[in-house]
Amino acid sequence: MAEGPEPGSFPAGPETSARPDSIAEIRDIRKTYYKPDGSVLVEALKGVDVTIPRGQYLSIMGASGSGKSTLMNILGCLDTPTSGIYELDGTNVAGLDDISLSKVRGRKIGFVFQAFNLISELDIVENVSVPLLYQGVPRSERRRRALQALEEVGLADRTTHRPRELSGGQQQRAAVARALVTNPAIILADEPTGNLDSKTEATLLDLFDELHGTGMTLIIVTHEQGLADRSERTITLRDGEIERDQFNRSGGGR
């Protein structure tokens, strides 16, 4: 299987052998879904190997059924592989139980979803603060960090607004702020421009470029070639395997 090109902890997990310059490394990751009778329904991933250096801007592409959503779920600690090793920021998370995996996910991964997933009853500061609430961060510190994240994405003047009072682009930037508020190791975005018009999409992609410029590791799952071309590197999946792993000449927004 193809391995990612050369680049360039969670304390409860086991020791790892990940390369010191990588933020995430998966080796021989397989994911099989079974029928109730125990027979194989589908092999979603068939021995995938990927190394993601710290600070890389990576896009993942593939047609429906290619395995890209399964790979995203494993990278985001939303699902576990059937077999293989996944080392995230110094910890092999592939074999963690649900509670430990949830803790890693909350601290290491910031999610940006196509549908924004903002809570309509809360104002934007409260929405951005939600991940910190689950971590037990005191209220005053939650608010301070939420305001800082909103300033970073250009929404410092919208803090008292509720989601319905914001445009689609502003809601997506609020979602990015929510992803940033925990100071994650990786920002993982699933089709982040799917609900945006072309002008708003361009603004969001400029924001991703800025985040990449600060050294943030970004993983974007998309079916849009134009979005993928903005990244440093594109992995294309086909039938559960890596079909292509390439650097993009003009990618990365730098």
Image (spheres, grey):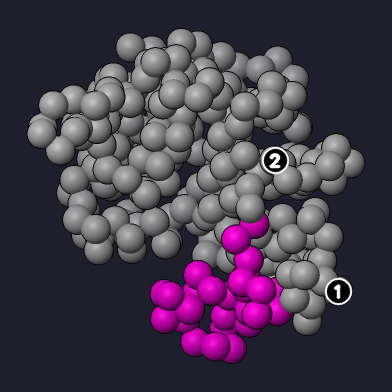
User: Vertical placement of 245 versus 179: above or below?
Assistant: above
Q: Quadrant of the N terminus?
A: top left
Q: Residue furthest right?
A: 199
User: Vertical placement of 9 versus 122: above or below?
Assistant: above
Q: Position of residue 195 (x, y in %)?
A: 73, 45
Question: In the rendered view, does 75 fall on the left or right side of 7?
Answer: left
Q: Position of residue 211 (x, y in %)?
A: 68, 47
Q: Amino acid at mark 1?
A: Asp
Q: Amino acid at mark 2?
A: Gly
Q: Could you say which quadrant of the image residue 28 lies in?
A: top left
Mark 1 Cα shell of 10 Å, populated few (<14), some (14-19), many (≥20): few
Which mark is first along the chain, 1 or 2? 1
Residue annotated with mark 1: 157
User: Vertical placement of 67 versus 159: above or below?
Assistant: above
Question: In the rendered view, does 35 fall on the left or right side of 166?
Answer: left
Q: Position of residue 249 (x, y in %)?
A: 70, 15
Marks 2/1: CA–CA distance: 25 Å
Q: Which residues are magenta?
A: 116-144
Q: Quadrant of the C terminus?
A: top right
Residue annotated with mark 2: 194
Q: Residue furthest left?
A: 37
- Identified at 68% across, 26% down, the residue is 224
Q: How many marks?
A: 2
Q: Is residue 21 visible?
A: no
Q: Position of residue 132 (x, y in %)?
A: 50, 74
Secondary structure of the residue carrying tag 2 is loop
Label annotation for residue 82: none
Which is more foreground, mark 2 or mark 1?
2
Q: Could you say which quadrant of the image residue 73 lies in?
A: top left
